[in-house]
Amino acid sequence: MALLRFLRPLLATAALGLAVLATAPASAQMTPAQKTEIQGIIKDYLLSNPEVLRDAMVELDRREKVEAESARQKAVAELKPKIYESKNQAIVGNPNGKVTLVEFFDYNCGYCKKSLDDIANLIKENPDLRVVLKDFPVLGPGSVEAARVATAVRNQLTGAKFWEFHRKLLTARAPASKATALAAAKESGVDMDRLNKDIDRPDVHAAIEEVMQIADGLSLTGTPSFVLGDDVIVGAVGYDELKTRLGNVRKCGRSNCG
């Protein structure tokens, strides 16, 4: 029983007790018979108490999420100038707003399309909200092409005019591509000759590469993803959640006051 009590802490912090034992320094000093005996005890314990593995995995998942969130907050602090103030981004809403919401999106992302109305309503209901849009084309060549066109469009359209272009392209029925992006730009009144020249400019490629580097630093793998204050919000969490998070930033300076 004393041995079993010694092993319980190991079982509570690992998914497989056998793996823990195999890597323990003390195991090198055990005889084969002792190892076999202890392995048998662990096996019997796990078979009698399988919920230990479940609890250990739940705890491991919780710890990994805490570590990931801590790492992301550290990355936000280090990358803050590029996240919030880079010249390589579109700004909609109030450009001088007191609260800034950053969205990483892909023009082919279905969840980004669903989040569009959420962002529009937040802008409408929050006069002090500044929204930063960052092209994060992760869904294939069409997304990259659309992002390049949109980045070049920013040389001509800003603020509300760019927002209208953004909405046209994001809500287009056809998959986002160079063709659909150019069509949305033409419909938005862009000088197409200038646009076609700007698409191939080095700074357009550099702007998209910068977003990719920021996303990598924040460990973002999908869209939409948001940065609010010092916090990263992954996924299309919906209007109510974003509204609550904005309220928290005003109240305590963090998107999660808890």
Image (spheres, helix red, strand yellow):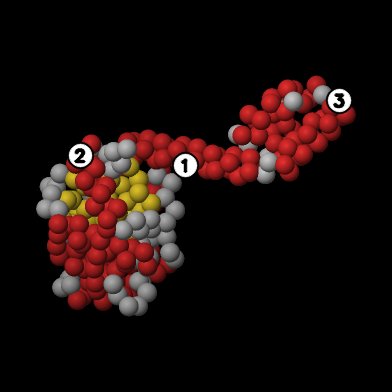
Q: Judge whether 174 appears above or below 124 on screen.
A: below
Visible in this render: residue 89?
no
User: Marks 2 and 3, Cα distance to the nearest angstrom?
Assistant: 61 Å
Q: Earlier in the sequence, mark 2 or mark 1?
A: 1
Instruction: Give the class, few, some or many, for how many residues have Cα within 10 Å of label 1's Cα (few <14, many ≥20).
Output: few
Which residue is labeled 3 in the image? 31
Q: Are marks 2 and 3 in contact (CB under 8 Å)?
A: no
Relative depth, front residue between 244 and 65: 244
- Residue at 69% x, 26% y: name it: 5
Q: Secondary structure at mark 1?
A: helix
Residue 165 figure quarter: bottom left
Mark on residue 251?
2
Q: Is residue 68 above or below residue 141?
A: above
Q: Tag 1: residue type? A: Lys
Q: Label 2 to label 1, Cα distance in Å?
A: 25 Å
Q: Residue at x 35, y 71 (%)?
A: 176
Which sits in the foreground, 238 or 221?
238
Three-letter residue code for mark 2: Lys
Residues under numbered marks 1 and 3 in contact, where contact means CB atoms less than 8 Å apart: no
**Observer-nearest residue: 218 or 228?**
228
Left or right: 86 with respect to 4? left
Picture coordinates of residue 25 (x, y %)?
72, 24
Residue 100 in the figure: left or right of residue 31? left
Q: Mark 2, residues whose alpha carbon is within 10 Å: few (<14), some, or many (≥20)?
A: few
Mark pair 1, 3: CA separation: 39 Å
